[in-house]
Image: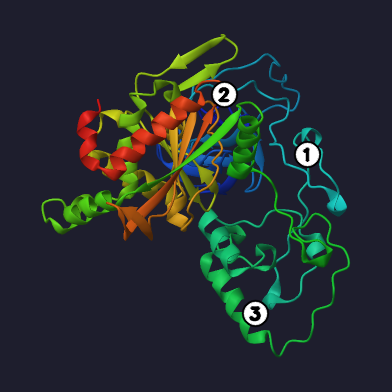
Amino acid sequence: MTEDFRLPDLGEGLPDAELVQWLVKEGDTVALNQSIAEVETAKASIELPSPHAGVVKTLHARPGDVIAVGSVIITFGDDAAEEPVAEDAPAASAEAVRTPNLVGYGAETRASGRPQRRARAAGGGRRDTAVLDAAVLEAAPHDAIPDFAPVDVAAVRERPRSTPPVRAHAKQLGIDLALVEGTGQDGLITREDVDAFAAHAGLAEAAAPAQPEIEHVPDSLFEAGGATRIPIRGVRRHTADAMVRSAFTAPHVTSFHTVDVTKTMELLAGLKADKAYADMRIGPLAVVAKAVCLALTRTPMLNSSWDEEAGEIVQYGYVNLGIAAATERGLVVPNVPGADRMTLAQLAGALGELARVAREGRTTPAQMMGGTFTITNFGALGIEAGTPILNPGEAGILGVGAVQRRPWEFQGEVALRDVMTLSLSFDHRLADGAEGARFLRDVGDILQEPGRALLFG
């Protein structure tokens, strides 16, 4: 008896996912809910749990394959002998089959059980994604590269097999994984392989003769002149699509407000010095987040969305506070549900956990859905201000600049003070300039005099 497992709907409304790596191989015995594969969608990297306990009979995809939702990716069996299937057995009905799985229902079964593979543009030409996404590309052989010798890059047709951390490590070192020989299971490139290649290349750089110039490198990441071509997919494509949709749908307006936050910084320094609060790790971003939640109670239109289809404005009675986070996979915006009901200490803890999960690349699709207002922290990168783009569907996003020590007018004299610039972008369909200014002033007042938070509510 065999059981097919189809790629489930991962709850994001996305039609496909890319297989990053298998965590099992054919012949392995797996337990129920054991992780069997890592897949990457436009929003997150996810480990798929096994819906069956048994023996892995067939893996229907390879790392790098883009698999349509509903396609069979793995077949399970038991130890009992299986009856052979007659060659003239009737084909499965073309009628859509919906089978329950761990996450949702699979899409309609396709005529072919093989996953789709994204084609690459030849000769650096322009791509027609509507056509290429539906194309099927047969895998060219990927021979092992002995002793780091020069390789015919034109023969490398597939994305090298590796894990996201290894790809990030190679990118940081400036190494093309197509030149690295994998020593892991089934040719998987490990971190040790990358480090070995880096060490070898560094030692051989001075003594090695000049490498012959490659005149043409089709279907690779390189073009003449040293330009690099990076496939647009995953989080990067999702972010680009979302930003373009936001920029050309919502009429953006950005306002700036520079605030003396010396008293807020003194408050945080006092909490850090107090042993009773030292473990809470409350930073400026947590105070800004609390100020945003309080200010939104007075400007609720900035905590709303525009429903074009229904012809309505949806005003939320809660704040799901999104935090834009830069990760190795690209920009993600997970949110803290019910942030308006949290204390300052609870917000600080939630923001810290959210940032840790994002850095580890474990942010789930559910954590990025349902946001109502977003904060982006320019200050973490040492930037004073910017013009942030709205997270699609939201009315406002607040950019938080770096805290800087500047000469500032204080009580009639010039003094060195801690200063921060706030940048608010908002949807002018939902809020006018006066509402944007009121919101910025309210947030700034709380940061300038933290005790004023007692007046809000």
Quadrant of residue 322 in the image?
A: top left
Vertical side of 287 occupied by 10: above or below:
above
Work out whether residue 66 or residue 187 is closer to the camera in this orientation and state it.
66
| SS at badge 3 | helix
Q: Which residue is mark 3?
A: 201
Instruction: Measuring from the top left, give residue 334's x and y in whole percent.
Output: 44, 38
**Drawn side of residue 417 relative to residue 307, left or right:** left
| Residue 136: image tag | 1
Give how far across and how far down residue 307 sits, in percent: 55, 15
* Distance in Å between CA atoms under marks 1 and 2: 21 Å
Residues at circles 3 and 2 in contact by the CB criterion of under 8 Å:
no
Q: Which residue position holds label 2?
A: 106
**Residue 316: image location, x then y, percent:** 40, 19
Nearest to N terminus: mark 3 or mark 2: 2
Give the residue displayed 28% in from the left and 53% down from the top: 262
SS for callout 1: loop
Q: Residues within 10 Å of mark 1 (few under 14, many from 20)?
A: few
Q: Secondary structure at mark 2?
A: loop
- Give, as a three-letter code, the residue at label 3: Ala
Res 371 visible: no
